[in-house]
Image: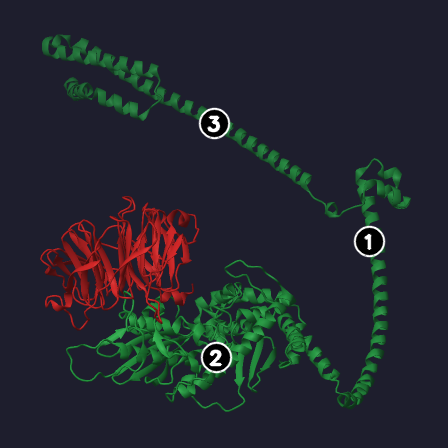
Chain colours: A red, B green
């Protein structure tokens, strides 16, 4: 990888290993890099410890989504899902355990996969992407058992409400759809851009992030990032963030969000922006919090740079991992 | 009478009574050595007088005048006592004087004796000193190395050795040995004189023979001269080669190695390379004669003195200048290597050797076959200063590769060699290697020396030099059409672009490194260390309608091996740059990263123009696929003409910048 390629690299996805000691990150060249958090967080860490312990080409297109199960790392490339065993990756063995492709209609272009989410209740994987549909795969058998159709443009993001057995999806068409996984039917459809509080016509109508926590939902994108009460399906607070947000998450009583602009935003549930923490990449695509290991409990943020910022404390950047 | 006497006595007695201690003290003060006996007598007399006077008194007060006879008697008595007292006093004085005289006499005698003793002691010391001086005397003969005693008795003739005298008397023995030494030395001096005479004779005979040999030279020359037409007729340039070899003998070793290797390479591989020697041969001859070591030392120490002097007297700056010039002086001979390209343009390389610094430098000049149209932005391309920079990566040729030079520079106050490169040429590392010079660099590597080093670098360097010239000439041609806002796309590369590209190159200008570094949208390139001050910088402006795309470009001297790097800023409905807009960043990577698609036929001289054309194409796609704000009525400024499968894709909503050739549609990467 030459310096020019590094200059034009973007990090799209991250996932922590089940043990919490490794971080996998996917970039726009289809590569996955595995970083060792334990060595980069040690007090005597040098530049070398902040380089990946393993880099391998996983897909042809960009790696838009990464996900960890108890034993495997799942990565999504152009129209395919690959699984890598974490134990094999730790031994620097980069052979995929399995590769699955959802059934797509014939097209000139293979649709990309933008989001994956695991439904632990029936051990299935929901995959959303370029063909406007959500494909549900049974992880046990590897068979795609159902297709959720309804979006009119490609799907940006997915989120699961396990207790209710509901799957949420946000797409380029500006709709957040709630699906009953058991029946495969769309239960609700919220067109966020039609709500005046959230709409930002100068940016567009797409929804690029959806997150849920019990009865609450966060969504944003072209429209402003907003907190919704799901029972009443109404926005309770709208966050005055300038750029389009690409990923958001609940953390304790805070909302963390990243998107356009070189900072991670901390918002209060009431709708105030508490702080903007500067990061290295000029715009951010992904943030991830390591909850798998208490000693390596860090927040990592990646974006349009070869650097992944690591926060040991939420309020300032500790150091950067780099490809 | 008696009453008179009484009256007289009375005060006397009274004075005696009151003055007794005073008298005593004054007497004691005056005569320290008053004898005890004298004192006792005096005291006794005084007591007597006292008693008499008391009796008198008594008599006067209580006894009647009848008793006056007795008083008279008493008076008589006291007078006698006084007389006695006076006599005793005189005696005491005389005795004292006598004692003093005796003491003085004795003391004088002792002093005389003491003086005598000291004189004697001094004499003894002086004599001892003289003795030790004599004992320490060194004779000159002790420094002469004599033959050993046994050898002397064996070799010396008996009239010198005189065995019977010298056997037991060491003095005589030494004298004899010295005589023998003198004799021997006389003989050796004689021998030396003889040898000198014979040497003179031999020298004379050599001289005669030399004269004879040199008288042969003109005759031989005449024969050579006569044979020249024959050589020319037969096309055998012996003479020329011979002349070159003759001059080459005076070349310094690195230039000689270079000459030999370039000749060898041109004979074996590439006939288009020619080499010639230029410069003052006589000066070079003069240079090669005097022993250089001693001169060097002197100049070094001089330089040190010089430096100290300049601190005291600033007028010596002129001399320091001379020292600098002396240090940077090139060898009077230089090599000129000409590389001819197929189109007839020639790259002239002039190689110099700096004797005191032990490095080689090179100057370059290009002479082109056709008169090149003067493109303003192309001015830097064939500039002899920058033409050869970074032929190998990071070989900038501004600093001297010889680490020893730094210390030499310190002595004469040269801050950096970079100030002199325009005058002396550039000391690139490949130049040193071609001359067989190898200097230890910061990183350890395998070292080869001399001719094998030069040979191992010759082929790659010559190929790089030719490639550099051709790429620069190709760029030169492209730049002149770019300045007329035409992006030349050759027929081999037509398939990379659709037939209709609406965006047009509007401006093509050159800029400096500082101007580049100040642009707000190039900071990431500068920070990544991809913009060096050896690179060339250009600003392209691509326009379509109201949109204006600025592209700042870094052109590495190693182009086309190193891809030119673009940084973009779009001025349309507000300013957007590659840092703030993911799609512009994607456009940057489209032109910067995918050089394999763009470089065209090897070795890729069309890379730059293809990149510019793709930039125009990407701007078309960017503008046509920009989502329309539904609230604004009226026709779109840029109607969608390009065939796209999808306008946006992925989480960062990229536009389809990739052109698929035969089908003619645009897709995502």
Residue B427 is situated, as x and y percent measured from the top left of the image, at 53, 71
Q: Looking at the image, which residue is at 53% across and 58% down?
A: B444
Residue with the mark numbered 3: B107
**Quarter of the C terminus of chain B within the rendering:** bottom left
C-alpha distance separating marks 2 and 1? 88 Å
Residue A285 image position (x, y, % from top left) = 27, 62
Q: Is residue B231 left or right of residue B114?
A: right
Nearer the observer, B516 or B626: B626
2 or 1: tag closer to the N-terminus: 1
Can residue B318 be seen by looking at this rendering?
no
Q: Which residue is mark 1?
A: B185
The answer to which image quadrant residue B329 occupies is bottom right
Specify the quadrant of the image occupied by residue A6: bottom left
Left or right of B173: which side holds B237? left
Looking at the rendered structure, whether the residues under marks 3 and 1 are on a common chain is answered as yes
- Secondary structure type for disc 3: helix
């Amino acid at each position: 990888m030459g310096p020019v390629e590094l200059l034009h690299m973007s990090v799209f996805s991250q996932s922590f290993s089940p043990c919490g000691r490794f971080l996998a990150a996917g970039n726009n060249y289809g590569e996955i890099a595995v970083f060792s958090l334990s060595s980069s967080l040690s007090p005597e860490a040098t530049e070398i410890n902040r380089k990946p312990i393993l880099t391998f080409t996983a897909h042809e297109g960009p790696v838009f989504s990464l996900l960890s199960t108890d034993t495997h790392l799942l990565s999504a490339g152009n129209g395919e899902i690959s699984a890598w065993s974490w134990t094999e990756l730790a031994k620097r063995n980069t052979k995929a355990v399995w590769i699955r492709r959802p059934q797509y209609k014939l097209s000139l272009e293979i649709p990309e996969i933008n989001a994956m989410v695991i439904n632990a209740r029936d051990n299935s994987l929901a995959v959303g992407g370029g063909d406007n549909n959500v494909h549900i795969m049974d992880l046990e058998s590897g068979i795609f058992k159902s297709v959720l159709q309804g979006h009119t443009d490609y799907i940006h993001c997915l989120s699961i409400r396990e207790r209710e057995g509901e799957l949420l999806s946000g797409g380029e068409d500006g709709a957040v759809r709630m699906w009953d996984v058991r029946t495969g039917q769309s239960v609700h459809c919220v067109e966020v851009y039609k709500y005046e509080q959230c709409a930002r016509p100068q940016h567009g109508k797409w929804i690029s992030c959806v997150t849920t926590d019990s009865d609450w939902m966060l969504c944003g994108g072209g429209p402003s990032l907003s907190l919704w009460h799901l029972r009443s399906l109404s926005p309770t607070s709208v966050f005055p963030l300038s750029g389009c947000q690409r990923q958001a998450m609940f953390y304790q009583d805070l909302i963390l969000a990243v998107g356009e602009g070189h900072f991670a935003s901390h918002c209060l549930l009431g709708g105030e922006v508490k702080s903007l923490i500067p990061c290295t990449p000029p715009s951010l695509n992904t943030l991830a919090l390591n909850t798998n290991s208490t000693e390596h409990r860090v927040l990592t943020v990646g974006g349009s740079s070869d650097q992944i910022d690591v926060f040991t404390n939420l309020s300032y950047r500790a150091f950067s991992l780099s490809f | 009478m008696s009453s008179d006497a009484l009256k007289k006595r009375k005060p006397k007695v009274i004075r005696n009574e009151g003055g007794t201690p005073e008298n005593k003290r004054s007497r004691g003060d005056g005569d320290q050595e008053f004898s005890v006996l004298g004192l006792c007598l005096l005291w006794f007399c005084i007591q007597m007088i006292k008693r008499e006077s008391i009796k008198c008194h008594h008599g006067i007060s209580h006894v009647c005048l009848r008793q006056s006879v007795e008083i008279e008697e008493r008076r008589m008595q006291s007078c006698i006592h006084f007389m006695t007292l006076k006599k005793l006093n005189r005696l005491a004085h005389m005795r004292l004087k006598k004692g003093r005289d005796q003491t003085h006499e004795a003391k004088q005698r002792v002093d005389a004796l003491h003086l005598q003793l000291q004189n004697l002691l001094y004499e003894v010391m002086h004599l001892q000193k003289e003795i030790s001086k004599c004992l320490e005397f060194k004779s000159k003969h002790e420094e002469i190395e004599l033959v050993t005693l046994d050898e002397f008795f064996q070799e010396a003739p008996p009239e010198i050795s005189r065995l019977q005298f010298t056997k037991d008397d060491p003095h005589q023995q030494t004298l004899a040995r010295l005589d023998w030494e003198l004799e021997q030395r006389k003989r050796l001096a004689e021998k030396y004189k003889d040898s000198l005479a014979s040497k003179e004779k031999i020298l004379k005979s050599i001289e005669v023979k030399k004269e004879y040999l040199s008288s042969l030279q003109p005759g031989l020359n005449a024969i050579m001269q006569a044979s020249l037409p024959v050589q020319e007729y037969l096309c055998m340039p012996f003479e020329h080669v011979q002349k070159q070899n003759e001059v080459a003998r005076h070349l310094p070793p690195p230039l000689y190695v270079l000459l030999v290797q370039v000749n060898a390479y041109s004979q074996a591989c590439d006939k288009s390379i020619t080499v010639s020697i230029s410069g003052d041969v006589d000066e070079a001859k003069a240079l090669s004669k005097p022993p250089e070591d001693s001169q060097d030392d002197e100049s070094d120490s001089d330089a040190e003195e010089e430096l100290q002097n300049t601190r005291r007297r600033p007028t010596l700056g002129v001399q320091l200048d001379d020292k600098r010039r002396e240090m940077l002086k090139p060898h009077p001979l230089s090599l000129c290597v000409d590389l001819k390209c197929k189109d007839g343009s020639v790259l002239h390389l002039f190689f110099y050797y700096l004797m005191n610094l032990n490095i080689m430098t090179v100057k370059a000049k290009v002479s082109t076959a056709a008169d090149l149209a003067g493109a303003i932005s192309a001015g830097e391309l064939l500039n002899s200063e920058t033409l050869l920079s970074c032929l190998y990566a990071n070989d900038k040729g501004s600093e001297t590769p010889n680490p020893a030079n730094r210390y030499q520079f310190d002595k004469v106050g040269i801050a950096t060699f970079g100030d002199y490169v325009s005058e002396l040429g550039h000391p690139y590392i490949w130049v040193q290697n071609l001359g067989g010079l190898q200097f230890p660099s910061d990183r350890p590597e395998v070292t080869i020396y001399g001719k094998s080093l030069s040979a191992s670098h010759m082929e790659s360097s010559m190929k790089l030099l030719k490639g550099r010239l051709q790429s620069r000439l190709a760029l030169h041609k492209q730049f002149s059409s770019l300045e007329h806002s035409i992006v030349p796309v050759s027929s081999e590369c037509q398939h990379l672009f659709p037939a209709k590209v609406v965006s047009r190159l509007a401006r093509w200008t050159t800029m400096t490194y500082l101007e580049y570094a100040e642009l707000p949208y190039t900071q990431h390139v500068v920070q990544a260390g991809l913009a060096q001050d050896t690179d060339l910088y250009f600003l392209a402006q691509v326009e379509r309608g109201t949109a204006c795309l600025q592209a700042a470009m870094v052109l590495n001297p190693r182009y086309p091996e190193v891809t030119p790097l673009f940084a973009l800023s779009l001025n349309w409905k507000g300013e957007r740059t590659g840092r703030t807009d993911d799609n512009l960043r994607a456009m940057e990577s489209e032109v910067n990263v995918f050089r394999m698609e763009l470089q065209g036929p090897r070795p890729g001289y069309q890379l730059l123009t293809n990149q510019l054309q793709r930039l125009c194409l990407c701007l078309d796609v960017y503008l046509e696929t920009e989502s329309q704000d539904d609230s604004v009525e009226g026709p779109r400024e840029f109607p969608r003409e390009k065939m796209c499968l999808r306008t946006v894709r992925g989480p960062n909503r990229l536009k389809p910048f990739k052109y698929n050739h035969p089908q003619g549609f645009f897709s995502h990467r």
